[in-house]
Image: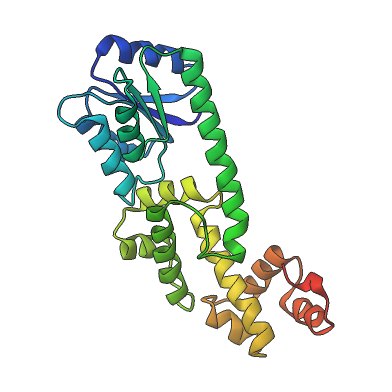
Amino acid sequence: MGNKKILIIEDNDELRGFIKNCLEHLYELYEAPDGKKGWEIAVNELPDLIVTDVMMPEMDGNEFCKNLKKDERTSHIPVIMLTARAAEEHQIEGLESGADIYISKPFSVLVLQNYITNILKSKESLRQHYSQKIFLEPLDVEVGTVDKKFMERLMAIVDENLEEPNFSVPVLSKELGMSKAVLYKKFSALVKIPIGEFIKSLRLKRAANLLIKDKLNISEIAWKVGFNDRKYFSKEFKRFYGKSPSEYLTEYEKGSDSAIK
């Protein structure tokens, strides 16, 4: 997991340096001395995980976490909170702010490393799961509320523009009010499919439905799902379904279950 990005937010320079030394051989690290600076880094870099202290100047850990989890750009990022406040009500406050794990100081480095490893593995498993499920139930992805709304909004925009040949990731990012860089990172964090390929797959699924239900010819279907080139459409259809549009329709008409992917 050497390419994973972790943001460390801790106002104690010595402790922040200690955590950095323990993790820098495993991950790409960013660091901040307070929640305000940490927030700027989180929005710009979209790290894979954040380790943050609770008691900090400018913006404390609880406020930082609440901001992170309610913002559409960053809501997917898991958070580990570190604190010397071990009382139960403080732990509950941390978890209610959206933290995934709450660790009391002093803590074991091995415990922190294991928590990070397990969270990242869990996120990766969810990406795999959603990558498969989203093709079957694109609006029924069981992510957090903010992420679910983001995916629903994204899907609605894509669905409205499938007939537009010039519809692309830059157009989608503008419609979402999100930069291309942020959109790429956000989508990649949720779904293990490049967003351009995802849009193309939705065009091809629409094409398969039109092929079966509307009985249009191949050129008409290609045009209706945003492909100007019939040959390119047929090539991409076969790459996605393993058979040409005409083969797909023939198998469907024979009642072959294998025609539907």
Give the quadrant of residue 173: bottom left
Q: Position of residue 152 (x, y in %)?
A: 43, 64
Q: How is the image coloured?
A: rainbow
Q: Is residue 35 above or below residue 148?
A: above
Would residue 95 be found to the left or right of residue 260 on screen? Answer: left
Give the quadrant of residue 100: top left
| Residue at 65% over, 77% down | 208
Q: In which quadrant is the N terminus drawn?
A: top right
Question: Tag count in the figure?
Answer: 0
Q: Position of residue 257 (x, y in %)?
A: 80, 73
Q: Position of residue 63 (x, y in %)?
A: 23, 37
Any part of residue 161 in sight: no
Would residue 121 be found to the left or right of residue 60 on screen? Answer: right
Q: Position of residue 239 (x, y in %)?
A: 70, 63
Q: Is residue 29 above or below residue 256?
A: above
From the viewer's side, name the closer residue of 64 and 242.
64
From the viewer's side, name the closer residue of 60 and 212.
60
| Residue at 60% over, 83% down | 221
Would residue 229 be found to the left or right of residue 159 on screen? Answer: right
Give the quadrant of residue 40: top left
From the viewer's side, name the closer residue of 130 and 102.
102
Q: Residue furthest front?
A: 88
Q: Residue furthest left?
A: 58
Would residue 107 be found to the left or right of residue 142 on screen? Answer: left
| Residue at 20% over, 24% down | 56
Any part of residue 73 in sight: yes
Q: Is residue 65 above or below residue 243?
A: above
From the viewer's side, name the closer residue of 181 and 111.
111
Q: In which quadrant is the C terminus drawn?
A: bottom right
